[in-house]
Image (cartoon, grey):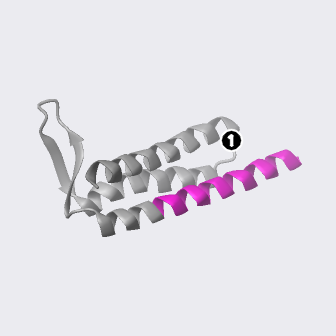
Amino acid sequence: GKEVTMDRKKNRIIAFALIAAAIVLFVFGILALPENIVIQVASSGEPNRMGKIPGLLIPFAITAVFSVLLILDDMEDKMKKHLIGSLLGLVLLILTIGINL
C-alpha cells in the first residue's frame, strides 16, 4: 500500500541525511584533528591512539553501511535495527571528534 512507500521514502530521506551528516563530520575531523587521535581510553588511563583517517573511517563506515541497509531493506523489523546502527555510527563519530578537538 501507500504507507509502505511513504515509509521507504522517509527512510531514504533519513538515510541520506545521516550519510550527509557523517560526510560533513568526517571531512571536519580530517581537517580539524591531529594526525593521531584517541579512539578509546584503556582502564589504565592510557589512551589508545590511531591515525585519524582509520579512526574516523570506522564510525563513518558503520553509519554508511547501516544507512544503505536502511534504504535497501523494506522489512519493518529490520529498519529500526538499521536506523539504530546508523545513529550509533554517527554518535561514535561525534564522540571521536569531540574527544580529540
Give the image location of residue 90, x and y in percent.
46, 49
Question: Residue at image x 63%, y 42%?
Answer: 79
Residue at the image point whose x is 20% and y is 38% from the top: 41
Name the foreground residue: 101 vs 36.
101
Residue drawn at the location 47% of the way across and 58% of the way down: 22
Q: Secondary structure at mark 1?
A: loop
Res 36 quadrant in image: bottom left
Look at mark 1 in the image and give the residue it sits on. 75
Assign the magenta stretch its main secondary structure.
Answer: helix
Q: Amino acid at mark 1?
A: Met
- Dot 1 surroundings within 10 Å: few (below 14), some, or many (20 or more)? few
The range drawn in magenta is 1-23
- Residue 5 is one of the magenta-drawn residues: yes
The count of marks equals 1
- Residue at the far right: name it: 1
Residue found 65% across the figure and 35% down from its top: 77
